[in-house]
Amino acid sequence: MVTRVATYTNHTLLSDLALRNAARVTDLQNQASSGYKSRDYAGIADSTQRLLNLEGEYTRAEQFLHNTTQAKLRLQSMETAVDSMITIATEMKTLLIQATSAQQADDVNVMSQGDKALEQIANLLNTNLDGRYLFAGGRSEESAVDLEKMSAPDNYISSNDNDLTTATTLAALGVTTGQLEIVSTDLNGNSVTSNVNYNAATDDIDDILTAINSVTTNGAIASLRQLGDSGATRLNIENVGNGSITISESGTGTLLSVLGMEKIPNPREDVDYYNGDQQIMDVRVDTSYNVSYGILADNPAFQKLIQGISMVATTEDLDALNVALGFIGDAINDLPNVQGQIGLDIANIERFEGQHEDFKIFASQAISDIETVDVPLTLAELSQYETALQASFITISRAADLSLANYLR
């Protein structure tokens, strides 16, 4: 076909329209096959910045959700552990009530039961998730508690027959002069033997305390305390380290027998079992918001439970078991508060989790609206453009046949 001056304009117009239709048909075919408006940002230039912003915010929301999911799993594991501790404590309380009310500590084998319970508590406080000990604070790579240190140091304590003060004289107690030999261990685990002389005619309880506590290479320490939170104030002589302690008397002295000194579990508060630190975990849950969460294994509720069960595991003395019953009862009262704190942390994290889940739904839809096409509508539009393109080709073909000879015919 020869394009003449007279037909040039029409030919050019028809060719441009056909090329545009062909380009549009190609675009629509690509969109229909891929489901996307364009293979690059150039094809959606007017929405590119909004798309980039949405994608960035979507990625941040996913990271926050990863953080909240991880923190919530940790808290749920801790909550389950505390719930198990409440069950163990309740069972031990029932056992102790039976043992102390009927004086059947030996019959119900409380020491064996206490030892098993103590091991269970240690395992629960050493709950590990993804290589992290949850109750250990910042030192999460190490176990939170050491079972070998879960009992306070060995000690001897006087009976409750005498309510002692530092001014109580040995003469008033009817003690005769003698010497105590105390074999114990120091903080380094070295065995230490201390000889303590006392004079029944001139000494009082304060002199006994001073004599024991002033030994240079001391492996023992003496104090006055109650067995628990009530009752008579007693003389307590305990090991400095975590080893054993034995006390014997030489000569004609009667201090041990008069005071009824007996080796029973240590009644003092003790958290030497704790291997962690005081760092509380936190998690970034939003752009400018962190949530602190978690409980440490030296929490007073855990300490009371360990203290009570430790006493049960090491003695059948009724006075000591009654004190242990008090500690365990306090733990039963306090542990639900610990569990409640964990629940509040979970609820706080879930609040942000819900916000990010909602945003992900919104952002995902917005990104889809920018990037993707409605395939059925695109196919319908493609059909229209293909029809128009075919019509353009027919029109160009017919225009090429126009001539004066054809017109006159």
Image (cartoon, grey):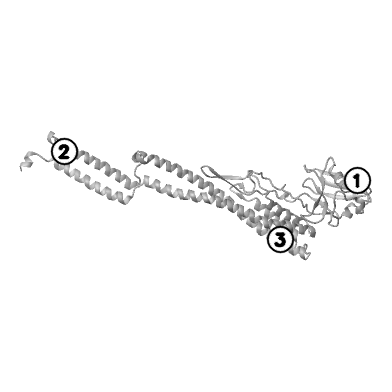
Query: What residue is disc 3 on?
Result: 93
CA gap between label 1 and label 2 equals 128 Å
Q: Residue at x 82, y 53 (%)?
A: 233
Residue 176 appears in the picture as rendered: yes
Q: Residue at x 61, y 54 (%)?
A: 340
Residue 289 x/y as whole percent: 54, 44
Crowding near the residue tagged with mark 1, few <14, some 14–19, many ≥20 C-alpha atoms within 10 Å: some
Lower sequence index among marks 2 and 3: 2
Q: Amino acid at mark 3?
A: Lys
Is 301 left or right of 396, judged from the image as shown?
right
- Give the residue type at disc 1: Asn
Q: Which residue is mark 2?
A: 10
Q: Are marks 1 and 3 in contact (CB under 8 Å)?
A: no
Q: Secondary structure at mark 3?
A: helix
Residue 331, quarter of picture: bottom right
Residue 326: x and y in percent read: 74, 58
The reply to whether residue 116 is visible in this rendering is no
- Counting from the top left corner in percent of width and height, residue 239 is at 80, 47
Crowd around label 3: few <14 · some 14–19 · many ≥20 (10 Å): many
Residue 281 quadrant = top right
The part of the image, by quadrant, that contains residue 405 is top left
Along the polypeptide, which appears first: circle 1 or circle 2?
2
In contact (CB < 8 Å): disc 2 and disc 3: no
Q: What separation in Å lies between label 1 and label 3 (alpha carbons)?
A: 42 Å
Q: Position of residue 182 (x, y in %)?
A: 85, 47
The crowd level at tag 2 (other Cα within 10 Å; few <14, some 14-19, many 20+) is: some
The residue labelled by disc 1 is 197
